[in-house]
Image: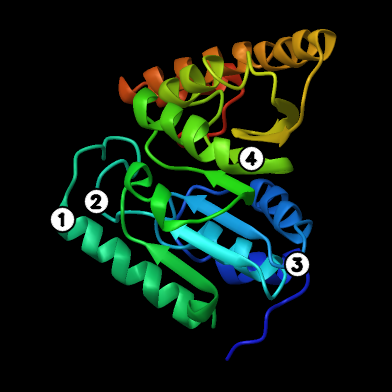
């Protein structure tokens, strides 16, 4: 069995070669969140793809943490232009996910639930200390993940949401839930990875919390403009917006 590295640099060296959308700075935020959970904690990841973020979570978490990776590996909701299911593509992702976990010596640490997140609620019992949401980015599924799975997060627990203030569906889902919520304190973001803490907010706190999130909307509009330019094959113009290339996330 491969020994678990203790430093983020060692963890990221292991995860960096795996296809995925998690940036190093976002990986650090995920790593820190997993390192901070208590003994026996439950960590749930929605949207594992090929295991990049899963490996970061498993390497950082306490040895007795329960780590559940939920991903149907159906070949859809996978990336830009890859929304429709594709069984062959999904099976390839599943095989790569299993292979990557085995290569990292982590297959025994992860319980993979190969279902859509909406169908996996009964597969996890009790409260969740850390929730990482990077599932389907359409409004309906994204909102359901925040509401249904977010509702399982314990007091003072953490929810991390990828593609926040970048994806239209995820951003609308946050605007209709976390932005106006009494129970989610916004702690900031690393690019599109937003962090929330379960807390009971007073009226004044709630207003300030909402304003901090609404202040991210100009960045969201910039991301939409970049995506439109890339889609229209005008990617060179994204430099005018300070973009260095590639899909913004």
- Residue at which label 3 appears: 39
Residue 71, x across and y down, in percent: 37, 54
The disc label shown at residue 75, or none:
2
Closer to the N terminus: mark 1 or mark 4?
1
Query: Can residue 248 be spotted in the picture?
Result: no
Cα–Cα gap, marks 1 and 2: 6 Å
Residue 235, x across and y down, in percent: 41, 25
Q: Residue at x 68, y 43 (%)?
A: 154
Crowdedness near tag 3: few (<14), some (14–19) or many (≥20) residues, C-alpha within 10 Å:
few
Q: Residue at x 56, y 23 (%)?
A: 165
Give residue 214's quadrant in the image.
Answer: top right
Tag 2, which secondary structure? loop
Residue depth check, mark 4 versus mark 2: number of the one nearer the observer: 4
Closer to the N terminus: mark 3 or mark 2?
3
Closer to the N terminus: mark 3 or mark 4?
3
The disc label shown at residue 87, or none:
1
Foreground pick, 170 / 118: 118
Residue 160, x across and y down, in percent: 62, 40
Give residue 93's quadrant in the image.
Answer: bottom left
Closer to the N terminus: mark 1 or mark 2?
2
Q: Left or right: 76 with respect to 45? A: left
CB-based contact (under 8 Å), mark 3 and mark 2? no
Cα–Cα gap, marks 1 and 4: 30 Å
CB-based contact (under 8 Å), mark 3 and mark 1? no
Foreground pick, 204 / 4: 204
Cα–Cα gap, marks 4 and 2: 25 Å
- Residue at which label 4 appears: 159
Vertical relation: 101 (above or below) 127: below
């Amino acid at each position: 069995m491969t020994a678990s590295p203790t430093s983020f640099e060692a963890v990221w060296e292991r995860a960096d070669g795996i296809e995925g959308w998690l940036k190093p700075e976002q990986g650090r935020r995920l790593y820190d969140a997993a390192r901070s959970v208590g003994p026996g904690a439950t960590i749930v990841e929605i949207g594992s793809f090929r295991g990049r973020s899963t490996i970061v979570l498993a390497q950082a978490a306490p040895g007795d943490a329960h780590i559940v990776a939920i991903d149907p590996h159906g070949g859809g909701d996978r990336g830009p232009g890859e929304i429709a299911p594709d069984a062959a593509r999904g099976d390839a992702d599943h095989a790569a996910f299993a292979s990557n976990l085995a290569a990292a010596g982590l297959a025994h640490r992860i319980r993979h639930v190969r279902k859509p997140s909406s169908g996996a609620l009964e597969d996890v019992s009790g409260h969740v200390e850390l929730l990482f949401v990077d599932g389907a980015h359409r409004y309906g599924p994204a909102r359901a993940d925040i509401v249904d799975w977010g509702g399982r997060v314990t007091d003072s627990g953490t929810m991390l949401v990828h593609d926040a203030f970048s994806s239209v569906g995820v951003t609308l889902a946050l605007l209709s839930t976390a932005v106006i919520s009494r129970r989610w304190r916004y702690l900031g973001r690393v690019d599109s990875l937003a962090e929330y803490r379960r807390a009971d907010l007073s009226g004044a706190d709630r207003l300030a919390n909402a304003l901090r999130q609404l202040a991210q909307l100009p960045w969201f509009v910039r991301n939409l403009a970049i995506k439109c330019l890339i889609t229209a094959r005008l990617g060179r113009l994204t430099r005018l917006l300070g973009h260095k290339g590639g899909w913004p996330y």
